[in-house]
Amino acid sequence: MSPRNTFAASRRSHTVLKWLQSGRAVKIQDVMDEFGIQYPQARADLKLLEELYGLSTHRDGRTKVWTWSGVNSDYVDVATAASLELGAIALDLFKGTPYGEEIERFAEHSRSKLKDSLRARVERLSKALHLRRTWLPVQEDRVLEMIETAIDSLFVDSPRWLLGRYERSLDDVEPYIVLPRRIIWYQGRLWLMALHGMELKLFDLAGFEALGTYRAADGELDRDEYDVAVGDVPEDTTPPLERGPEKLEGFVEDLDDAPETFFEDSFGIYAGDHYPVRPIHLEVSSPWITYLNRYRLHPSQENERDGDSLHVRFEMNLCPEFRSFVMGMLPHVEVHEPVELRQSIEDRVETWLDRTAQAAE
């Protein structure tokens, strides 16, 4: 293997690159001290990075210093075009609306700024990037209205609560008072991450029958405005403003609502802390060996091959969707832990067998 390839694959290159990209000026002595290597090797490492990434250099007295030289404008142009292509989902959602018109105008403006030499590359890139978009809400106009309402709420400086009628999975419709935090594309659908009370939850935007701005006077609902936007609401519905405006502002400011944190223990749509995090140990046989060696169901997944079996371990929420996923792996799966997962699957199988037998009679 050539020195270039050897270094490109080494841990030193990644560490030094992070230093440079964070704005740090790097000297040969820094590399020597960090990795315990001699001057010639440290110098060769930095010279190779200089060649590969076009680093800038200057002198601090007699000492040579390497710095990140900034972003290549060609890369910026192509990255912008790629982002616009990946934003096709947003274009689909907002087609025919003022939002969509502005997105299209920005996209065209960005493309017009590309150098002639880059346009052919961007065209090839556009054709290569193809998103399979399967999120197809039945009530498209209604969903678009919900999206616009949520976005308008997110634009304001002060917290703006929304009132909505939301259809839950049990086919019942309930009123919710929520404070939008994020709009998230997840599992092929568009979700509203919002505070309900003082708890972060996910709401499928296609599940809202109506969504409107909430205003409260003296802790009570403005029912006239709500009735127009949403419809009748039970008299005992109360706003989640027990903390008062100032305490609420502080709570929202300190809230960790980063999607990375929110979804770190999740599986499927069951995000947040509604279900316990458990160590999970499955043993699978073919054809699931190939599947689980190719894809991760969760970042915590660890695989260990044992003859004709694959042991797969997770640390994540033990939620209904994961239970159903494991059921779909039968008969090619054995649950080693937790016991409650194995028992719930056995109970489901017995229930299904009983119903099948009764139907046969």
Image: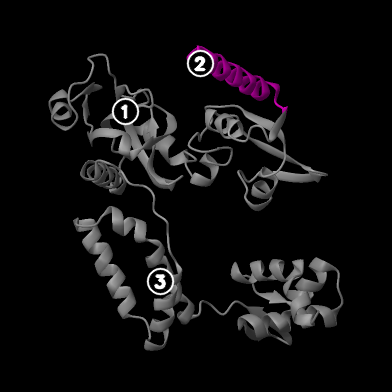
Q: Amino acid at mark 3?
A: Ser
Which residue is at 35% across, 56% downward? Answer: 89
The rendered magenta stretch, by its main secondary structure, is classed as helix
Residue tagged by mark 2? 360
The mark nearer the N terminus, 3 or 2, is 3
- Using the numbered discs, state the Cα–Cα distance from disc 1 to disc 3 in whole angstroms: 38 Å
Q: Amino acid at mark 2?
A: Ala
Q: Is residue 10 above or below residue 191?
A: below
Q: Residues within 10 Å of mark 3 (few under 14, many from 20)?
A: some
- Using the numbered discs, state the Cα–Cα distance from disc 3 to disc 2 in whole angstroms: 55 Å
**From which residue to which does the magenta span run?**
336-361
In percent of width and height, residue 285 lies at 72, 40
Is any atom of residue 264 visible in this view? Answer: yes
Numbered label attached to residue 126: 3
Q: Is residue 82 left or right of residue 207?
A: right
Looking at this view, is 297 or 278 the one in front?
A: 297
The outermost residue toward the front is 361
> Is residue 297 located in the magenta-colored stretch of the structure?
no
Q: Is residue 41 above or below residue 306?
A: below
Q: Is residue 230 above or below residue 304?
A: above
